[in-house]
Image (cartoon, rainbow, N blue to C red):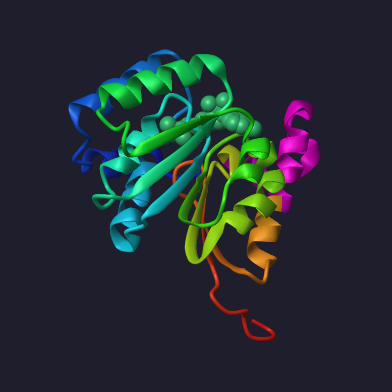
Amino acid sequence: MNVDERMITYIRSLDRGENERLRSIEQEAVKDHVPIIRKETAGLLKVLLRMQKPEKLLEVGAAVGFSSILMSEYIEPGATITTIEKFEPRIIKAKENIKKAGKMDVITLLEGDALEILKGLEPSYDFIFMDAAKGQYIHFLPEVLRLLAPGGTLVSDNVLQDGDIVQSRYAVTRRNRTIHSRMRDYLWELKHNDALETVILPVGDGMTISTKLTAPAPEGV
Ligand SMILES: C[S@@+](CC[C@H](N)C(=O)[O-])C[C@H]1O[C@@H](n2cnc3c(N)ncnc32)[C@H](O)[C@@H]1O
């Protein structure tokens, strides 16, 4: 992303950091090339959770459990997190990490393809974090909107694709063109769906924050 590296380094230098358990999960994930949320993404999530105090959270894309364990540190007692992962080696690791972190009564890991799993979930969740395959966000969206409570928050990560999103599709490598056009469709939908108010932020690899309206937006807004 086109944000001054020195600025990012400076902002990161002010971070208080996480507890030892989270630090070790993070280090292992980096070593094993498991993609996990960036520090800036974590920072924004933490503030949103403190502000909104959600009781029922849903995450699409658990990987090894880093972000769900992190979020569990910033929610109120009694709040729960359901997270979804389909890649077997990561499921095994996520279960291990959740257990070691002592979060088995807070975090439920659902195993399988999110598209199928989402269809079987009952509304409603007051905070949903979308962090799975970028090309599938647009396909997850109808189920995610069904599951999101009015007044609830949807946060989506990696939406600006290291800046590729502003490139013409021909300037994007052929391999990434489908993801590029699907992510553009996703962002358009988030910004134009009458049920949502959305901001797109150049934080981390690009994040959106959407709130599901409790009443339809007035005409022309
Ligand atoms: C960016 S990683 C998630 C990182 C995690 N949220 C964190 O920060 O600790 C995305 C994960 O989504 C999983 N994933 C991708 N598509 C999926 C799908 N359709 N259903 C379930 N999991 C999926 C991938 O296997 C991968 O582990």
Q: Is residue 168 left or right of residue 5?
A: right
In magenta stretch: residue 38: no
Q: Quadrant of the C terminus?
A: bottom right
Residue 164 in the image: above or below residue 200: above
The residue at the far bottom in this view is 219
> Residue at (32%, 59%) from the top-left corner?
53
Of 59 and 193, the residue lying toward us: 59
> Residue at (76%, 44%) from the top-left corner?
181
**Does the image show residue 201?**
no
Residue 145: give x, y in percent of width and height: 62, 57
Residue 33: give x, y in percent of width and height: 47, 17
Which corner quadrant of the image does residue 49 belong to?
Answer: bottom left
Which residues lie in the magenta part?
Answer: 163-185
Residue 35: give x, y in percent of width and height: 48, 26
Location of ligand 1 given as a quarter of the image: top right
> Residue at (48%, 26%) from the top-left corner?
63
Residue 85 in the image: above or below residue 204: above
Residue 184 in the image: above or below residue 115: below
**Does the image show residue 152?**
yes
Of 4 and 123, the residue lying toward us: 123
SS majority, magenta: helix
In magenta stretch: residue 172: yes
Residue 151: give x, y in percent of width and height: 48, 68
